Image (cartoon, rainbow, N blue to C red):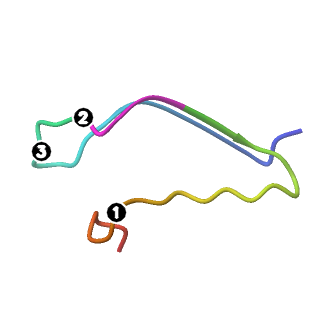
């Protein structure tokens, strides 16, 4: 049983023409740890 299911067809930022995510599917099961990383300064907050 998954505790999180994510499905993204397409994603882009509001004022951008570039699609940054396409056909993303992610499932997380209990006890799993998921880390999403990127280059420094890529907008991670």
Indicate the quadrant containing the C terminus: top left, top right, bottom left or bottom right: bottom left
Residue 39 percent across, percent down from the top left: 34, 62
For residue 23: magenta? yes
How many discs mark residues in the rendered view? 3
Q: Which residue is mark 1?
A: 39
Q: Most prominent secondary structure in the magenta stretch?
A: strand
Residue 38 percent across, percent down from the top left: 40, 59
Residue interval drawn in magenta: 19-24
In this view, which residue lies farthest toward the bottom? Answer: 45
Residue that appears at 17% across and 48% down: 14
Q: Which residue is mark 3?
A: 16
For residue 6: magenta? no
- Identify whether 26 is placed above or below 39: above
Residue that appears at 10% across and 49% down: 15
Q: Is residue 35 left or right of residue 41?
A: right
Q: CA distance from mark 1 to mark 3?
A: 19 Å
Which of the 4 image quadrants contains residue 6? top right
> Dot 1: what SS?
loop
> Dot 3: what SS?
loop
Q: CA distance from mark 2 to mark 1?
A: 18 Å
Label 2: how many residues lie within 10 Å, few (<14), some (14-19) or many (20+)? few
Label 3: how many residues lie within 10 Å, few (<14), some (14-19) or many (20+)? few
Residue 34 percent across, percent down from the top left: 67, 56
Q: Earlier in the sequence, mark 2 or mark 1?
A: 2
Label 1: how many residues lie within 10 Å, few (<14), some (14-19) or many (20+)? few
């Amino acid at each position: 049983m998954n505790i999180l299911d994510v499905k993204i067809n397409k994603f882009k930022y509001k004022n951008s023409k570039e699609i940054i995510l396409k056909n993303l599917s992610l499932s997380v099961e209990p006890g799993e740890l998921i880390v999403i990383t990127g280059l420094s300064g890529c907008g991670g907050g």
